[in-house]
Amino acid sequence: MLLLRTREELLAWRAGSPAGSPVAFVPTMGYLHEGHLALLRHGRALAGAGSLVLSIFVNPTQFGPKEDLARYPRDEAGDLAKAEACGVDVAFCPTDPAVLYPNGTHTWVEVEGLDRHLCGATRPGHFRGVCTVVAKLWGLVRPDYALFGEKDYQQLAILRRMHADLNLVGEVVGLPIVREADGLAMSSRNSNLDPRARQDALAISRYLQELRIRFTAGERTAAGLLQDPAAALAPGRVDYASLVDAEDLQPARVVTRPALVAIAAFFGGVRLIDNCVLHP
Ligand code: PAF
């Protein structure tokens, strides 16, 4: 596995990679868990005899000033061992934000509309940071496939739009949420939960499970499906609990088309997200 640190190294590797040989790309912020590893394994299969590229970069521009950039978990050595075991060919791990943001940055990528609700509303500027860094990485890696998890459903929808609107090469591939045995959606941030908060956080997947049961029983209204999220997620603090159209991510009052239930809540100061899609 090649470990590359600079833009120049990555550009030189890409220029030398054989024409017509597929490149699969998994961009991450590191602290790899089973969700990331599922993306890497799928990327390995898609790339075949071609190359699997992983990036690890905790992107400062997608964190707000009061968010957890400084506390974001990191373990580069552990990540590289896991990457190697998944058959990664190239790990791009800049050690300095200036590698991707030389001399400050003056070009931003923003997808309008899809960011109006959910994380876009409660984390202003977050998706602008995500789109900007992914666009930069896309230009360097020029992947045939770029893989993202559906836990970040809104991120995936926004990146699909960016990919289409900017005529980027290759395709965006989304993979289902990977959960712990007890239902908690895998997230690098889970490592910041203390044992009490880890236990309390199970309320999210339980809430989604109960909501799905109400949906299967015929409930179709947002009010009837969501009921009282503050009580259901207590002692967690709800950031949002919303029902939106699964395609345009605008609020839905009744489920008549595929709809997304998206949850964000804080447990012991750690913000977690989870979701499920309802198909009428
Ligand atoms: O999902 C993530 O880990 C990040 O938002 C991404 C896509 C790697 C951009 O920094």
Image: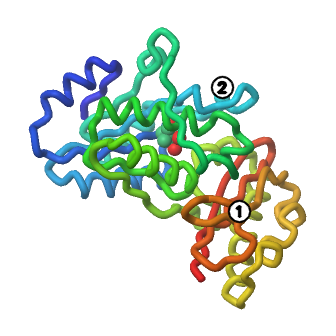
Amino acid at pointer 1: Pro
Q: Give the vertical position of 224 relative to 31 (above or below).
A: below
Q: Residue farthest to the bottom?
A: 217
- Mark number for residue 251? 1
Q: Position of residue 115 (x, y in %)?
A: 62, 46
Q: Residues within 10 Å of mark 2 (few under 14, many from 20)?
A: few
Q: Check disc 2 and report the residue beneath it.
A: 70
x and y percentages locating residue 184 in the rendered image: 64, 61
- Which quarter shows the N terminus? top left
Count of number-bearing discs:
2
Q: How would you rate the neighbour count of disc 1 (Cα within 10 Å): few for under 14, some for 14-19, many for 20 or more?
A: some
| Picture residue at 71% right of the left edge, 62% below the top | 251
Quarter location, residue 263? bottom right
Q: Is residue 54 among the parts visible in the rendering?
A: yes
Residue at x 82%, y 54% (from the top left corner): 238
SS class, disc 1: loop
Q: Is residue 90 left or right of residue 68?
A: left
Q: Earlier in the sequence, mark 1 or mark 2?
A: 2
221 w.r.t. 23: above or below:
below
Q: Give the amino acid type for the residue marked by disc 2 in the picture.
A: Ala
Measured as percent of width and height from the top left, residue 255 is found at 67, 77
Q: Which quarter of the rendering shows the C terminus?
A: bottom right
Task: State the image quarter where residue 200 is shown.
Answer: bottom right
User: Who's the residue at 39% across and 35% down the image?
Assistant: 55
